[in-house]
Amino acid sequence: MSEPLHILGAGSLGLLWAARCARAGIDCRLILRNPAALREWLDRDSVLLLERQETIESLPVTVELADSSNEPIRHLIIATKAWAVAGALESIASRLQADSQLVLLQNGLGSQQATSQRFPSQRVLYASTTDGAWKRAANHVVWAGIGQTLLGDPRQQPAPEWLALLSQAGIDWRWEQDILPVLWLKLAINCAINPITALHDCPNGEVPERAGPLFAPLLAELHTLLGSQGVQLSLTELTQRVHSVIQATAANSSSMRQDVHAGRRTEINFILGHACRTARLAGLATPVLDSLHQQLQDHLINLGLPPA
Ligand code: PAF
């Protein structure tokens, strides 16, 4: 494969995927946001540290600034937070070609549709990943858990061949003919878990107990919302899915709780915000979801964080 793979976003997931490409010998370029970030990398000889269990691998990676090259970007993985997608993409927009293909790895919904609208001529693929990673330093990522990535084209076209690069990098991925229901189900699971963990500052395992009697009505509202979006599953199935994610990640901090701890902007607008807006547009009454959204916004404001 002669075209390099570009990764936009040097957060935990961007670093993890860059590291996995680097160790497989794939020509991968990590695009950094600003000169200070680039200096930090150059000071560390552009070596990315991949920590897994007790071992640390040193992997040389190619880093570049969005505007430091005019080289066309044909295959792009966007690994930023949902709220950063639009700005990050503008920084490389002039390097995209008519045949460029983009893969969006964000939580929630909203950034995907906005990207498809902004880049109507390019192929924009949507993905949902359960790969677990966290960042110890700018160039140091801890690989916490091997997950699976579901990918698809909202226009329901077949998988492009270049995705074979992901398999070469050892990334476990599967093509979904209908990706939107997959993303909606993930969003519903995030709506049920993340806000509660952020409000109560608790690990995922404590969510049902902390949510108390509101948990069942919350799941019922999410189930109705999923139905309105064409996601076919029963309330019992949704409840089981949510509880199994809670059990499997019981000791973990949700991404939203991690954002709050780090004093970072959260993805509330792309998770609860998107759910509440869609419910309103569909004419659904979702009082529990709306009140959770309001409580979380108030909580974020009290912490000095953006409420959207
Ligand atoms: O956002 C997250 O943290 C994860 O998607 C989930 C499923 C809540 C597990 O921690």
Image (cartoon, rainbow, N blue to C red):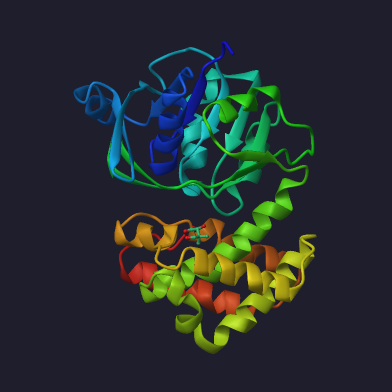
Q: Spot the residue most to the front.
A: 54
User: Which residue is rendered at x = 38% and y = 41% of the image?
Assistant: 11
**Left or right placement of residue 99 versus residue 147 in this view:** right
**Left or right placement of residue 125 versus residue 296 in this view:** right
Give the percent coordinates (x, y) of residue 293.
52, 71
Q: How many marks?
A: 0
Can residue 272 be seen from the camera position used here? no
Query: Where 69 falls versus 59 (above or below)?
Result: above
User: Which residue is rendered at x = 42% and y = 24% of the image?
Assistant: 22
**As rendered, which of 216 and 100 lies closer to the eye?**
216
Give the percent coordinates (x, y) of residue 160.
71, 26
**As rendered, which of 183 and 292 lies closer to the eye?**
183
Give the percent coordinates (x, y) of residue 71.
49, 12
Can residue 244 be seen from the camera position used here? yes
User: Which residue is rendered at x = 57% and y = 30% of the image?
Assistant: 166
**Left or right placement of residue 210 versus residue 289 in this view:** left
Give the percent coordinates (x, y) of residue 154.
74, 41
Q: Picture quarter containing residue 46? A: top left
Query: Where 179 falls versus 59 (above or below)?
Result: below
Q: Spot the residue most to the left.
A: 43
Q: Spot the residue most to the bottom.
A: 213
Query: Where 76 falls versus 176 (above or below)?
Result: above
- The quarter of the rendered structure image containing the N terminus is top right
User: Which residue is rendered at x = 58% and y = 68% of the image?
Assistant: 244
